[in-house]
Amino acid sequence: MLLYQPNNGYCYNSDTHFLYSFIIKNLEKFKNIKGELLDIGSGSGILGLLVARDNIKLSLNQCEIQKVFQFLTNLNSKNNKIINKLYEGSFLDINFDKKFDMCVSNPPFYHSNVVKSENTILNIARYRDSLPIEDFFAKVYKVLNQDGKFFFCYDAKQINELLISLTNHRFNIESIQFVHPNLNKDASLVMIYAKKSSKSLTKIMPPLIMFDNNGEFREEINDIYKKSATHSIKVDLNEYN
């Protein structure tokens, strides 16, 4: 999958590849994946495009607040021959004309009480004040169909707030996995599969460890990148401001 992304703004990273793999593994138990998929905060479009590529009966919808990424989302969808419907604007403000069977998102999750970059594009993509947890989960619940699936990743250190908020917004946590830089490091990322209208017990997946003792990617990580099969080309976003 060929993907254009900015050379002076937020670029997708390993989090998105790991979340994609987490989604695909959790969907394996379902025989017929179909319906409406919404990629929230699509950026360059990578997450929704990967999930739609591997599940051809899903109809891809994406929403994005920033003009430059709206352009890249549509460009990457067209170049990879995947039909998408793009909703332009803030996820919290959009009045969607349909409900969705699945929502996926790699949302901004850094706390805003830090020194920020002067790059507005980066700030919107990184910091959670542009998509507060409570508002985020409430809107996802509203736009999902009954039995709708919700996949996302977040800063692992904020797990307590995530679990409380998901419960408060009537989501059941179906599956959870933590990502660690190596065996001796604390988890840096958590990936969660939540669902409406479910009372299943939560599956705790084995931790995903990125590097071995020699500082090399572990085999499982290499397999994720191989399955993703993405290639990036940087473009100058100033041309599209």
Image (spheres, rainbow, N blue to C red):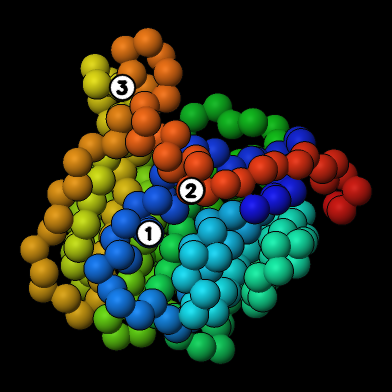
**Inter-mark Cα distance, 3 to 1:** 23 Å
Residue 227 image label: 2
Q: Residue furthest top?
A: 214
Q: Which residue is mark 1?
A: 24
- Secondary structure under tag 1 reads helix
Considering only vertical position in the picture, is 4 above or below 150?
above
Give yes or no for contact between labels 3 and 1 (Cβ–Cβ under 8 Å). Answer: no
**Residue located 76% across and 41% down the image:** 233
**Residue located 51% across and 88% down the image:** 98
Give neighbour class at mark 2: few <14, some 14-19, many 20+ (Cα, 10 Å): few
Give neighbour class at mark 1: few <14, some 14-19, many 20+ (Cα, 10 Å): some
Q: Which residue is mark 3?
A: 182
On screen, residue 3 versus residue 224, left or right, reads right
Where residue 148 sits in the image (x, y, percent)?
33, 78
On screen, residue 101 versus residue 184, left or right, reads right
Considering only vertical position in the picture, is 113 above or below 132?
above
Instruction: Give residue 115's quadrant in the image.
Output: top right
Question: Front-most of 6 and 238?
Answer: 6
Q: Residue furthest right?
A: 239
**Inter-mark Cα distance, 1 to 2:** 10 Å
Considering only vertical position in the picture, is 70 above or below 59?
above
Q: Which mark is first along the chain, 1 or 3?
A: 1
- Secondary structure under tag 3 reads loop
Give yes or no for contact between labels 1 and 2 (Cβ–Cβ under 8 Å). Answer: yes
Q: Which mark is first along the chain, 2 or 1?
A: 1
Give neighbour class at mark 3: few <14, some 14-19, many 20+ (Cα, 10 Å): some
Q: Tag 3: residue type? A: Asn
Q: Which mark is first along the chain, 3 or 2?
A: 3
Q: Tag 1: residue type? A: Ile
**Could you tell me if residue 55 is visible in this image?**
yes
Where residue 194 sits in the image (x, y, percent)?
27, 64
Question: Front-most of 187 and 77?
Answer: 77
